Amino acid sequence: MSMYFGLMFFCGVWVFCSSRKHLLIVLLSLEFIVLIIYIIFYYYLFIVFSELFVVAVFLTFSVCEGALGLSILVSMIRSFGNDYLYSYSMLQC
């Protein structure tokens, strides 16, 4: 079971490292990685400690991270008209 979680995690990291065009794809891959880490925490804490308070705190922080990413995406689309990462780095100067 841990082999599948490891494979899914590294697939998410690979998509995160290889996507360089759209900010939305980068944010989706980050959310996928956070979801896999959440599932790993849940299984580990349920089996070992039987305490799931840490999972709720982690889920709260991951929701805040997702909301921050979406607000950056909306701000970038309003400012530049698209979500291409290369256009943002060219305008940075």
Image (cartoon, helix red, strand yellow):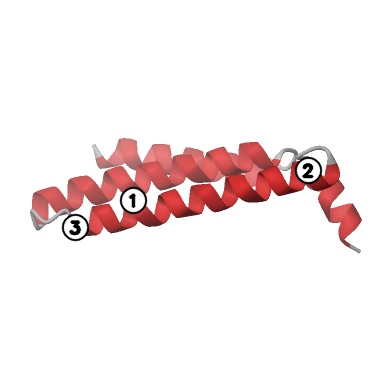
The mark that comes first in sequence, 3 or 1, is 3
Badge 3: few (under 14), some or many (20 or more) residues near its Cα, within 10 Å?
few
Asked if marks 2 and 3 touch (Cβ < 8 Å), the reply is: no
Q: Amino acid at mark 3?
A: Phe
Label 2 Cα neighbours within 10 Å, binned few <14 / some 14-19 / many ≥20 = few
Residue toward you, 61 or 27: 61
Q: Earlier in the sequence, mark 2 or mark 3?
A: 3
Please, what is the three-letter code of the amino acid marked with disc 2? Arg
**45 up-or-down from 21: above or below:** below
Q: Residue at x 78, y 43 (%)?
A: 78
CA gap, disc 2 to disc 1? 29 Å
Relative placement, left or right, of 80 versus 7 is right
Q: Which mark is residue 53?
A: 3
Q: Which residue is mark 1?
A: 59
SS assignment at label 1: helix
Q: Which residue is mark 2?
A: 78
Helix, strand or loop at mark 2: helix
Circle nearer the viewer, 2 or 3:
2
Q: Position of residue 65 (x, y in %)?
A: 49, 53
User: In the picture provided, is 60 more to the left or to the right than 55?
Assistant: right
